Amino acid sequence: MFFSRLPLFGALYTSYHTSFFALEWGKLFQQGLDIQQIIECMEQTSKATLIQELARELRVTLTLGGELPEKLRHFSFLTPEFSLIVFQGEVQGKLGEELFLYSQLLMERLFQRIEKTIHWVQPLIFLLVALMIVGIYAAMFLPIYGNIQGVIE
């Protein structure tokens, strides 16, 4: 949750994780699994991962009679639309297809954001490198020019 709240990196982090969960859940729902079976699969992953922690939270919520979309809304590493899509998919019965399509949409948006960021960062890096090169030349040649001025006088 810490990474999802960072100013520049948080939006990318949230988009990536939402896309990942939407893709995985979409595939599992399309294969005919229900939410309890999906949570069991998530819990069987390696220890101390985000997937396993999310599965534990969801299992507790569902055991206590809570609703899945309501619980998903509270996770800051998932987009707010994710819980709405899960709710709408449960109602319509096409949750697997909707999650799969949402995952593809999020990945496209994520790549567009990364490309925009690179288009802004790349010129700044080139400028920084150019300034460093000019600084190195100045540091090398200024003592030489100082010595030449001393010889001329």
Image: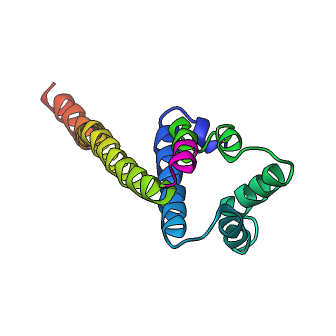
Horizontal relation, residue 71 to residue 12: left or right: right
Q: Nearer the viewer, residue 55 or 29?
A: 29
Q: Residue 69, image x and y in percent? A: 64, 43
Q: Residue 33, image x and y in percent? A: 60, 70
Q: Nearer the viewer, residue 117 or 42?
A: 42
Return the residue found at the far front. 92
Residue 107 visible within the image: yes
Q: Give me the residue at 31% from left, 50% from top.
A: 108
Q: Residue 93, image x and y in percent? A: 52, 54
Q: The N terminus appears in which quarter of the rendering?
A: top right
Check the image and report above or below for 35 versus 106. below
Horizontal relation, residue 120 to residue 47: left or right: left
Check the image and report above or below for 143 versus 89. above
Horizontal relation, residue 28 to residue 40: left or right: left
Q: Give me the residue at 60% from left, 44% from top.
A: 77
Q: How is the image coloured?
A: rainbow
Check the image and report above or below for 142 versus 103. above
Return the residue found at the far right. 64
Is 59 a magenta residue?
Answer: no
Q: The C terminus appears in which quarter of the rendering?
A: top left
Q: Nearer the viewer, residue 98 or 110?
A: 98
Quadrant housing residue 66: top right
Q: Which residues are magenta?
A: 87-93
Q: Give me the residue at 38% from left, 54% from top.
A: 101
